[in-house]
Amino acid sequence: MSNEEERRIQKEIAKIEQFLLQLGAPERERKNLLRTVFSNDDLPSDDPSLFLRAFNSYKEREEPEPADFEHERIFPYPEDQELHEAIHNLPLIDRTVWVLTNFHSQDHSSIAKIIKESRESVAERQEEARKKLHNLLTDGENGLSEAQLEKSMNFLIAAYAKLEMTETIETIKASDSEELIEKEQKHEPIAASRFKWAGPASVGLIFLLISLAFMLPAFEPGTGTENEAQEEEKEEEPELTRIPEEEIVELEEKLAEKLESLGNKTGLSEEELDQISYVHHINSVITEARAVNEKDEYDEYESDFVHHFGGYKEYITNELKTPMEFLEEEIANIDKIDYGPDSFSFSDMIVSSLLYRSIGFENMYSKKLTMLHHDYAKKNGADLNPSSTSVPEDITLLQEKIKENGFDYAYNAEAQRFDVFLGRVLVHEKLELLDPVYQTYLKERPELPYVINDELQMPFEDVPEELTKVEDLLIEVKNAQDAEGTPWLFDELAMEHEKLLTHFVYGYEKNANFEDGRLKEEVQKAWEKMIQPEKLEKYESAAVIKEQYDELAKRDFKQPEKWNQSNRIFDLSYTQQQNNLQVQPALIPLEGGRRTAFKEYQKNHDLALLKDLTPEEIALFYFQAIESEDPETVYSLLANTQERPTKDEFFEMATPEKLAAIDVDTILYQVSYFEDDDQHTLFFESVNGNTWLVDLASQNGINKIVYNRYDFY
């Protein structure tokens, strides 16, 4: 068996072992079931056939119902334990449909073959499983919303992804008498809440290593016996336990030089640069290195970090460059890139990397330019006048830096801020070598995401035009892409297009499509825009909407009993290429116990309620107060520092209208957390690529937020 084939089979074993766990097979039985699935030499290469074998083996076992649940041992969070157990309490067929649909991205046609029922029956079972889970997870009068179930499912998906599947080709082939005694598995202690995240250093380090893994230049592989010799040499290397302090100091000095240079080129301070995602990730390596050095033992990621510190050190010092420097360097090196300038993959790589670097600058430039203009207007007792030619030198210099670095800016009167974006001149001049699809995308970049926390981010009547515009791009990408894999742009657009189409067809609680049992008039008119003959000929999304429209027309547009998002299986030609992408739920608004605790604090700002909260939870209360447009609560969470304005000054600046414009509901996850005595620094990222750097100080035993002006611009 070749190494490649062995790796493929190992991957399939891990997938089927997880499937059996999700169905409810006890740990003591999974090995025998895996032996049955992988006993033949003619191992199928397609998922449905493997899932069919596993399902039949599980169904035919002597004890067909789930037993010996492991949820309390393998999941650290009670919420995951509860949902995992609730799924096990579904009837076997419903459970299988739910697991294959939600955890393994199998379509209804494939599942129908596995359970030997019709495709329509699969859809009905999926809906039935959803209802049963609602009932199982409903506590007394506290019902479970659609959004809450979806968010819990996404958390459980992430929890399954972290589990280590232990069986290998060797262990499932070995007889019971040949098996070695398994090593005692280490499990995390039960956490009291999902907000009690893992150790701070490891969270940031894992994110950093994952980021660098995608960005590090590839090493030239050896061949034949050379590879074997390298493997033997690698095995004989003594395990490093510490990164030499002199290497950390050397890197610290290099980063300081690079940051100073980057600041001079961009007109941003070191503090401002640190709020840009890719700069922060690079900056955090110093803290991570020292945190790792203090440990007595390493996990897999930390061990990799120590062993390859030299490579990371060399790479990250070269990474601190402006977006335009990156772009010019890549274009200058076109001849050295294997797939050449005419390749679709070249355009995809350039654009994804450029946006990764530029989004943070757009956000920070927007905040700083807006803040400087507001300060100038306030100082002169005048309204903000973006067209004024008489502005102070600091504004003029920043505007020049914005232009020099390839960006343009425009005043957004509705939001009362300056929007900064990649310049049109840059797209025309610097990117003329790109595929035309990518040039079009950069010139007309859509404002993503379309849906945040189940709420549409554009007027409903504008959705038809946006759906067709994105589908035009998808069609172009699909027709133009080469054979080097699904491009980043396709995945990005396909996922957003499906979310927008789903919302347009089914609506959500916050944007319902029905009122008083009938389809809203504005919804019907918007649908009718999409089902014109010329659109039906060209757009698959138009055909989906026409099908729903015709179905409702038979009912005089009255709301059907089962009209909800569980029916959202759209058989579009591009959907399958991105169906493994999971939508991460946003952290805000808070839900469940944390929302109840926040509401209690919001009533009277009793500091005693904050005493037992972690820095992460205080940060989430802060974000929730902004989301609630509540300046009183925001101010109550601020630490009493020299930077904090007076209450009157703060209320004048942070009006409810200003708070409403701050996109805290896009915050997806915390990516790093550093602690130094009584100071804590947390770094969050948003779905739209923006970032939040939150500093906390402990005062009288309570963690409070250090005021940051940039949060309010």
Image (cartoon, rainbow, N blue to C red):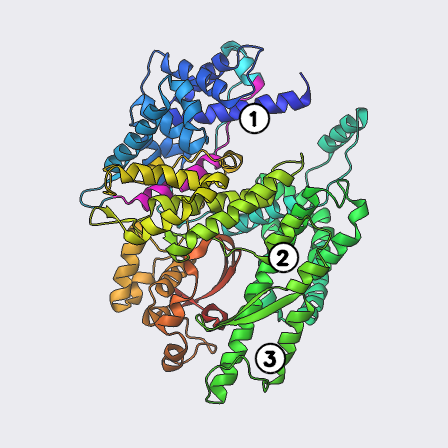
Question: Does the magenta segment cover residue 161?
Answer: yes
Question: Does the magenta segment cover residue 355?
Answer: no
- Ranked by sequence position, the earlier of labels 1 and 3 is 1
Which residue appears at 56% of the width and 84% of the height? 388
Element type where label 1 sits in the image? helix
Eyeballing the image, is 50 above or below 149? above
Q: Quadrant of residue 387?
A: bottom right
| Circle 1 residue | 11
Element type where label 2 sits in the image? helix
- From the image, state whether disc 1 or disc 2 is nearer to you: 2
| Circle 3 residue | 395
Q: Nearer the viewer, residue 38 or 182?
A: 38
Whole-number angstrom distance, CA of label 2 to CA of label 3: 23 Å
- Drawn side of residue 363 relative to residue 520, left or right: right
Residue neighbourhood size for the residue with mark 3, other residues' Cα within 10 Å, grouped as few (<14), some (14–19), many (≥20): some
Eyeballing the image, is 6 above or below 673? above
| Circle 2 residue | 357
Q: Nearer the viewer, residue 184 or 568?
A: 568
- Drawn side of residue 201 relative to residue 511, left or right: right
Could you tell me the amino acid type at mark 1? Lys
Give the x, y percent position of residue 269.
62, 71
Q: Nearer the viewer, residue 592 or 642?
A: 592
Q: Give the residues in magenta.
A: 144-169
Give the x, y percent position of residue 448.
49, 54
Eyeballing the image, is 41 above or below 661? above
Could you tell me the amino acid type at mark 3? Ile
Whole-number angstrom distance, CA of label 1 to CA of label 3: 55 Å
- Ranked by sequence position, the earlier of labels 2 and 3 is 2
- From the image, state whether disc 1 or disc 3 is nearer to you: 3
Could you tell me the amino acid type at mark 2? Arg
